[in-house]
Image: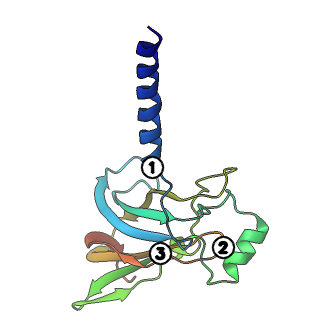
Amino acid sequence: MRRQQIHPYLFIIGAAWLLSSCFNEPNYSNTPEIDFKGIFKYPIAPGKGVGQSKRDSVVITIGFRDGDGNLGNSLPPSKADSTKYASNGKWGNYQIRTFRLINKKFEELPLSVNTTLIFPEFTPGKPKGAIEGTLDFNQTFQYGTSFTLYPTKFQIKIRDRDLNESNVIETDTVTVPFPNGE
């Protein structure tokens, strides 16, 4: 009778050991790595009042991997972090560059809203370790009284709190409005 009770326990212990060996922490580089997941544009209907004109919202989704998990910052960033970013490239931990198609050539259009972008810390208070996931960035493009639609694409990179910069990715092209003269 005792022998029959040992077999189920051995089976459960063996299954638990087998399953736990399947979940090893990934071995990612401590330099962040990103890949393009998608870009989605959807119109936002005009509301009532000042500044409520028709606009397009563009959501860019990227995937990320980082070996030591030090992505993101506390919000708002500390003065030390702000100074660190300002003295090392004058951008936060998320950089997006905008390119419009003009005369069959993509030309960069620096947008002031993209100067210093910060995304929140993913693992506050957690020990160092590999992380991966997705990050969405939303940008709005307003239709003004005078605008032109341009095919537009974006280049993106991120960096961690140690200022390690990821690879640069490029999105697909979407058509969005820009005020004339810009």
Q: Amino acid at mark 3?
A: Lys
Real-space Cα separation, disc 1 to disc 2, in angstroms: 44 Å
Location of residue 90 (image quadrant): bottom right
Residue identified by numbered label 2 = 162
**143 over 13 or under it: above or below:** below
Taking the image as shown, residue 153 lies to the left or right of residue 119, namely: left
Quadrant placement of the N terminus: top left
Q: Amino acid at mark 1?
A: Gly
Which residue is at a point 25% across and 70% down the rendered structure image? 175
State which tag comes first along the sequence, 1 or 2.
Answer: 1
Q: Amino acid at mark 2?
A: Asp
Query: Mark 1 falls on what kind of element?
Result: loop
**139 over 156 or under it: above or below:** above
Residue mark closest to the camera, 2 vs 3: 2
Q: Residue furthest top?
A: 1
Residue identified by numbered label 1 = 49
Any part of residue 143 in sight: no
Which residue is at a point 66% across and 73% down the rendered structure image? 162
State which tag comes first along the sequence, 2 or 3.
Answer: 3
Identify the mark at residue 137; answer none if there is no mark.
none
**134 over 2 or under it: above or below:** below
Identify the mark at residue 157; answer none if there is no mark.
3
Is disc 1 in contact with disc 3, using a CB cutoff of under 8 Å? no
Query: Mark 3 falls on what kind of element?
Result: strand
Name the spot of residue 20 as percent of width and height, x first. 47, 42
Q: Which sits in the foreground, 116 or 155? A: 155
Name the spot of residue 147 as percent of width and height, x first. 31, 73
Quadrant placement of the C terminus: bottom left
State which tag comes first along the sequence, 1 or 3.
Answer: 1
Query: Mark 2 falls on what kind of element?
Result: loop
Real-space Cα separation, disc 1 to disc 3, in angstroms: 36 Å
Residue mark closest to the camera, 1 vs 2: 2
